[in-house]
Amino acid sequence: MAYRKHILLGKIAKIHRYEGAVIIRLERNFSDNIPEMESVFLEIEGRPVPFFIEYTERAGNDILRMKFEGYNNAAKVREFVGCNVFLADAHFSGEITDDLQNLQGYKVISGKNNDIGIIKEIIHNPGQILLVVRSESGKDMLIPLHEDLIQKLNPGQKIIKMIIPEGLTDIN
C-alpha cells in the first residue's frame, strides 16, 4: 500500500457518535463518485499513517462516515479531527501497472533534450518504482519513476522527458 499525497479524499470534520466513526467532508472530485476502499492514509503531524477501514457509509452529498479497524470509541479517534484523508495506491494499481509496462523501449531525455538512454526494464520496489535505463555507452542506470519528475510523455515518438536530479546519472 503506497501513499498518494496528491489524491485527497477529504478532511475529517468531526467524530460520529461514540463507536469511533468519523465524518469526512469530501473533496469536490469525490462528491459523486467514491471509490471502493480497504485503506486510507491520514496525514498526522505532516506524515502519512495508514489505516484499514472497517466500514464506510455515505451520509450526504459531500459527507462520508468512516470507521477504522481497531478504533472502537470516540476517545481513540478524537486526535484525527482536522486530518487530511488520502487514498492509497491500491485504488489505482491496475491502471498504473499496465501503463508502466508500455514504457519499455521509450527514450528518456532530460533538461534541454539531453539523451539519457532507453528504458530496458521497470522494477517495482515497495514504495518506489525504478526505471532501468541503458545509455548509448551500454551503462545501466536506475532512475526513480515519480510523476513529479515527468515533464512530458510522447507515446507516438516513444519519448519520456524527465527532470532528473543533478548527479543522479553520475552515481549509477
Image (tube, grey):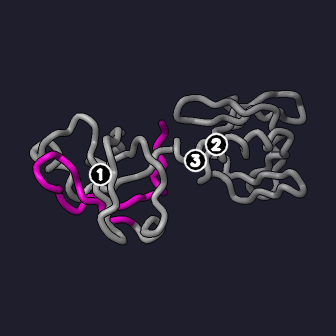
Q: What residue did someone put label 2 on?
A: 94
Q: Secondary structure at mark 2?
A: helix
Mark sitting on residue 66: 1
Q: Please name the residue shown 59% across and 29% down the image.
A: 125
Q: In this orientation, which residue lies closer to the viewer: 141 or 63?
A: 63
Q: Type of residue at label 3?
A: Phe
Asked if 61 appears above or below 51 in the picture, the reply is below
| Mark 2 and mark 3 residues within 8 Å of each other at the beta carbon | yes
Q: Nearer the viewer, mark 2 or mark 1?
A: 1
| Mark 3 and mark 1 residues within 8 Å of each other at the beta carbon | no
Q: CA distance from mark 2 to mark 1?
A: 25 Å
Asked if 102 appears above or below 155 in the picture, the reply is above
Q: CA distance from mark 3 to mark 1?
A: 20 Å
Q: What residue did someone put label 3 on?
A: 92
Q: Type of residue at label 2?
A: Gly
On the image, the x and y values in percent for residue 135 come to: 84, 35
